[in-house]
Amino acid sequence: MTLSEVYFYMIIIIYQFLSLVILVFTEDLKDEKRYKKYFKISFLIGLLGIIMEVLNWNYFCQFNCVLMTFTPFLTLNIAKGIMILFEKIFKKIPYQTHRGKLSDGIWIENKGDIKYRNYYNKYTFSIMILPIFIITGLFILIKENVC
């Protein structure tokens, strides 16, 4: 393995770690200012994947590198979409739970009411699982149609 490959895989692992951080701390996305900041940062990170693809610095199937570098961006937007969807459908602000208790973000304190525990548990399950399934589905689509 060359040094170039090591750097490539290191960058990809860091991007995947950023996606996990976004998933864990989605409570912070409720602040619109913070969401826009994360949006810009994750989009710029994704653009690096396009540059890597253009420079042919890719050790994956074509377009998989772009999808992997855009996973923080996709995760961010899928989580925000789920948040908006739950709020529109159930007419109640959703909050995440962790081990039966309300979960806070890094910057935002959770102000939910624990009497809606079932609703919050459904929301937490959706916000943790749906982005993973959607992005995995995109990987499978690219693999089946491009590779």
Image (cartoon, helix red, strand yellow):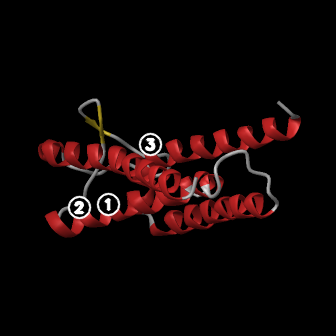
Label 2 crowd bin: few (<14), some (14–19), many (20+), radius 10 Å: some
Q: Residue at x 85, y 41 (%)?
A: 4
Contact (CB < 8 A) between labels 2 and 1? yes
Which mark is drawn over residue 24?
3
Mark 1, other Cα within 10 Å: few <14 / some 14–19 / many ≥20: many
The residue at which mark 1 appears reads as 83
133 in relation to 36, above or below: above
Q: Is residue 67 left or right of residue 91?
A: right
Distance between mark 2 and mark 1 Cα atoms: 5 Å
Counting other residues with Cα less than 10 Å from the Cα at mark 3, is it few (<14), some (14-19), or many (20 or more)?
A: some
- Chain-order first, disc 3 or disc 2: 3
**Looking at numbered disc 3 in the image, what kind of residue is underneath it?**
Val
Q: State the mark number for residue 86.
A: 2
Task: Residue 86 in the image: state x and y as whole percent.
Answer: 23, 61
Asked whether, in this view, residue 17 is left or right of residue 87, the answer is: right
Pinpoint residue 1: horizontal percent, then vertical percent. 82, 30
Which image quadrant is residue 47 in? Answer: bottom right
Rounded to the nearest whole Å, what is the CA distance between mark 3 and mark 2? Answer: 18 Å
Q: Earlier in the sequence, mark 1 or mark 3?
A: 3
Nearer-the-camera pick, 25 or 89 = 89
Q: Could you say which is closer to the camera, residue 114 or residue 123?
A: 123
- The residue type indicated by label 1 comes to Met
Q: Nearer the viewer, residue 62 or 55?
A: 62
In this rendering, position of residue 1 left or right of residue 77: right
Residue shown at the point (54%, 53%) measured from the top left:
71
Residue 50 point in image, percent of width and height: 70, 63
